Image (cartoon, helix red, strand yellow):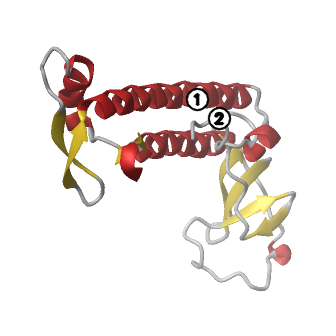
Amino acid sequence: MKCLIYLLSTGQSGMWLDTDVPYPNPLFGNFELDPNNIPPEYQEGAMAFGYWVRDGALTQVPPPPTLTELSDALVAAVRAKRADRILAGVPLAGGRTFAPDPAQLGRLSVIAINHIALDLETIDIEMGSPQVWESIDTDDLEAAYLAYVHNRELCYTNERTHLEAIQALLTAADRAGLESYDTTTGWPA
């Protein structure tokens, strides 16, 4: 959709915008509006940037988001979903959840993989929200750590799949595809 912001206070056209192309470049041009065709609800200064001209009529309704804005919102939703899924962690024995913070993950990886060589049967870690100290059997830690890393990598793979699909829709200038894109699919449980 090609739209124009029109400054009634000066009677000049401002910026042309095409919302149906990726990474829109505003187009500049002139537009003459019939001063007798101004909406009765118009109040000088009520809108900081003026009114939009859409389909030859003056309106306060802004144009739809650009394709880039749609794409950016989808990308943000995908990245937030990935972060949420990783933070959710994986189940541990006894109904607990293994969701270490990144600072603990380095410490735990060495123990989870080498607990037999280290001759450790249990370890103490802080978990949960709010965090509390818990003792975990190292065999349970190993299984939980491996499940956590597997889950995390599935999340990153799904994120990549979504981001590539969104980019393809943006490149194709597929507004309907971007507007209906579902960012909630494919995530590990």
Circle 2 residue: 186
Q: Residue at x 76, y 26 (%)?
A: 172
Q: Secondary structure at mark 1?
A: helix
Q: Amino acid at mark 2?
A: Gly
Vertical comparison of 136 with 162: above or below:
below
* Residue 108 lies in quadrant: top left
- Few, some or many C-alpha atoms within 10 Å of disc 2 (few <14, some 14-19, many ≥20)? some
Vertical comparison of 145 with 58: above or below:
above
Q: Residue at x 52, y 27 (%)?
A: 154
Q: Residue at x 73, y 35 (%)?
A: 21
Image location (x, y in percent) of residue 121: 18, 30
Tags 2 and 1 in contact by the CB under 8 Å rule?
yes
User: For the residues marked 2 and 1, what is the alpha-carbon distance in whole angstroms?
Assistant: 6 Å
Q: Amino acid at mark 1?
A: Asn
* In-image side of 35 versus 123 (left or right): right
Circle 1 residue: 158
- Few, some or many C-alpha atoms within 10 Å of disc 1 (few <14, some 14-19, many ≥20)? some
Q: Quadrant of the C terminus?
A: top right
Q: Nearer the viewer, residue 70 or 60?
A: 70
Vertical comparison of 55 with 185: above or below:
below
Image location (x, y in percent) of residue 105: 25, 32
Image location (x, y in percent) of residue 20: 76, 40
Q: Nearer the viewer, residue 158 or 39?
A: 158
Q: Pick whichever of labels 2 and 1 is earlier in the sequence.
A: 1
* In-image side of 11 versus 163 (left or right): right
